Amino acid sequence: MCPSATVRKIFQVATLVWAGAGILYAQLPAWRRVGNTVVDAGLAGTAGGAVDRVWYSPDGSRLFARLRSGATFSTGDFESWQPANAEPPAPSLFRLQAGMIQYRGKSILGGAPIDTAVSPRDSDEIVAGNAAGVWRSLDGGNSWVGLNDALPNLPATRIAEAGRRTRLVLDGGVEAEWMPGASAGWTLTGSRSMKPDWKLGAESQVAVSATSGEGAYAGTVDGRVLASIDSGRTWRPGYRLGEGSVAAIAAIPGEPRIALASAGRRVARTMNGGLFWDDITANLAGAPVTGLAADLSTGAIYAATRGGIFVTYTDLRSASPVTEWQPIAGLPSGVAPLDVKLDSEGNQIFVLLEGHGVFATLAPHRFREPKVVNALDGSGRAAAPGTLLSVLGARLTSARSGNLEFPILAATDSETQLQVPFAVSGTSLALAFVDARAARREVQVALRTASPAIFMDHDGTPILLDADRGVLIEGGRAVEAGSRIQILATGLGRVTPDWPTGLAAPADNPPKVVEAVRVYVDRQPVKVTRATLAPGYVGFYLVEIELPAVVNAGPAELYVEAAGQQSGRVTIHLVQ
């Protein structure tokens, strides 16, 4: 077993992992950064976006870089960058030889230099700016390092997917993903964002598109929105949304006839598959709209504009009055949002800021309609006896189902954590709760004998322990064959001997899980040496496994199974 101090530290994190997503939205959302602002592209260092000018100050004490966006930054320590107002001098006449930046015929800097500069202090100190960022050599071009890590110059244009898996579309249409446990940068997926092969006519050049079921929507560069209700086989006449190119379309999952679109400063919606469009711009006409997202159940619509992120509420299924848009605060000031997305559960809002990367927080509509999720992985999976649940968007004062009270373990203004009583039975729970404002709600929660969930952080990194050393296995660190791993989980159901709900498990001889627990690694079952309540904590289970003596080196999928129910998949890295 791992030392108690290590377990204590990890479970302290557990009580905050979901609450930290959006505390006190009404005052100031607690935005968190997703990933960083560089791309791990296998170059001489991590890459950034395009830099069109680089130069030194006359005394060589500072380096300046002008981004493609026109913003200028400077550094004196070659580690941190600050905004600068300096004007560049005349372009340098120095030119790098191809051999200085190539290895086996391929550029180690990600392309030819756009601009170069030589330090006034040392002629061997050379800096180059190109489509992949800023690069520095201290030996006359024999070796190079990137200077992009702290430069807010991520070349992302939109969010392709948000949630446990977050993918971005970069300049040129290539995709990058933030991998669980990653630290170097966004990883290129090898995929490219492709426009659908729709026959729209030679005059209709598609700028953006979206689909939902058989509903298909295409926005053109001349400001029209076209709609199809048969997956693009036939198209309805286009709606003229604006003079400029259509910048964003949001199709609603499960509702192919509902969509949103923006061009310039205008936003419109359709509820009938593009037959008619309603203008819902209202007070949003101050800045171009670059991204849209919506939550059908609450009627929340989110807009990313060059002036900030806004939200409004309406009935997306039927005609309703145009409503005012309200700003969402807390993001870095002076930085333009490029896109906005909701995760698949509709719980988190993700915003892409120009050059600064992705930020996320609890979606504001959750304060209007709280949602019950699994506390350890944020999913909407069924509950089980003893499961830890989170109610997102509410500080609860009480919760019960029938005559069973649910212990409240922690509460903030944005989230409450509960434990399902071990005594529950049946296939569903009518969970009734009262919040701090005395508002009463009741929600239905599916119930299973067991419903495993592995503890993961926001980026999808599983919280696993090295059982032999008693330390946390850092995300991305390889695990050796034959190792013993402890998995932190919830939802494994009843235990023996019976244990009171809401009470921390004993340090000695913790109760064992009744159901047979299986763990799979690389699609193969592995030996489970123990499955108990986690000593000293409420609602957590500790599952210990022993890896085989021979493994396939590389990433492997791990999941837990009990009573025929499986947890979500997580990735671990194996080494022989």
Image: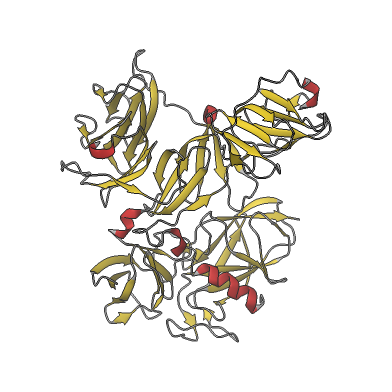
Which of the two residues, 203 or 423, is positioned nearer the viewer here? Answer: 203
Q: Is residue 458 left or right of residue 118?
A: left
List x then y, in percent, for residue 470. Answer: 69, 72
Up-down relation of residue 534 to residue 497 (above or below): above
Q: Position of residue 462 (x, y in %)?
A: 57, 60
Instruction: Name which quarter of the figure residue 126 lies in.
Output: top right
Q: Quadrant of the C terminus?
A: bottom right
Quarter of the image for residue 373 reads: bottom left
Q: Which quadrant of the figure has residue 372?
A: bottom left
* Pick the front one: 224 or 78: 78
Q: Position of residue 88 (x, y in %)?
A: 62, 26
Along the line of sight, the residue nearer the viewer: 501 or 184: 184
Applied colour scheme: secondary structure
Examine the rendering and report whether any part of residue 387 can be seen: yes
Can residue 161 be seen here? The reply is no
Q: Nearer the viewer, residue 302 or 11?
A: 302
Task: Say whether residue 49 is left or right of residue 253.
Answer: right
Count of numbered circles on the image:
0
Q: Residue furthest top?
A: 202
Percent x, y of residue 476: 65, 54
Residue lying furthest front in this view?
59
Residue at 20% across / 35% down in the picture?
272
In the rendered view, tell whether residue 248 sits above or below residue 149. above
Q: Quadrant of the N terminus?
A: bottom right
